[in-house]
Image: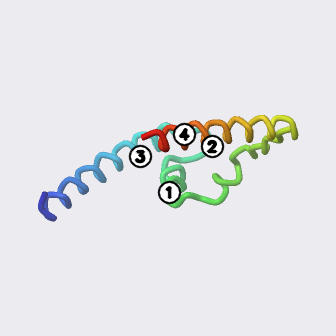
Amino acid sequence: MSITGAIAELNKEIERLTKIRDSLAQVAPTGTSAKTASSASTKGSASAKTAAPVRKKRVLSAAARKKISEANKARWARIRGAKAAK
């Protein structure tokens, strides 16, 4: 594909995405104007990032970690054994 063809395709895609963004901005939640929602989505505002829920880190017991480790060792042993047999 030529560079001009690729540029034309990218411009079409940008136009399509802009239309989608504008239509979503019109359905902005009450209390915010469509212009504010549109500008916030393009800037990637910090408030939107901080509003996301905090994910809790999973904690595994020592027994679970050992079980996973042993399963991984057994899997790698099978893989190495299969390679050595070839």
Viewer-side label of 2, 3: 3
Mark 4 in CB contact with mark 1 (< 8 angstroms): no
Q: Secondary structure at mark 1?
A: helix
Q: Hey, which residue is sitting farthest bottom in the picture?
A: 3
Is label 3 or label 4 in front? 4
Which of disc 3 and disc 2 is earlier in sequence? 3
Amino acid bearing label 4: Gly
Mark 2 near mark 3, Cβ–Cβ under 8 Å?
A: no
Dot 3 surroundings within 10 Å: few (below 14), some, or many (20 or more)?
Answer: some
Looking at this rendering, what residue extends furthest in the front direction?
85
Q: Quadrant of the N terminus?
A: bottom left
As drawn, the label of residue 81 is 4
User: What kind of residue is marked 3?
Assistant: Arg
Label located before the other in sequence (4 or 1) = 1
The mark nearer the N terminus, 1 or 2, is: 2
Label 2: how many Cα within 10 Å (few below 14, some 14–19, many 20+): few
Q: Is the residue 50 above or below the residue 29 in the image?
A: below
Residue 58 location in percent, x, y? 79, 41
Q: Which mark is residue 21?
A: 3
Q: Position of residue 78 (x, y in %)?
A: 58, 36
Question: Looking at the image, is 85 positioned above or below residue 2?
Answer: above
Mark-to-mark CA distance, 2 and 4: 64 Å
Q: Residue at x 20, y 53 (%)?
A: 9
Q: Residues within 10 Å of mark 1 (few under 14, many from 20)?
A: few
The residue at the point 66 percent across, 36 percent down is 74
- Amino acid type at circle 2 is Gly
Tell me: 5 left or right of 15. Answer: left
Mark 2, residue position: 31
* Mark 1 → mark 2, Cα distance in angstroms: 15 Å
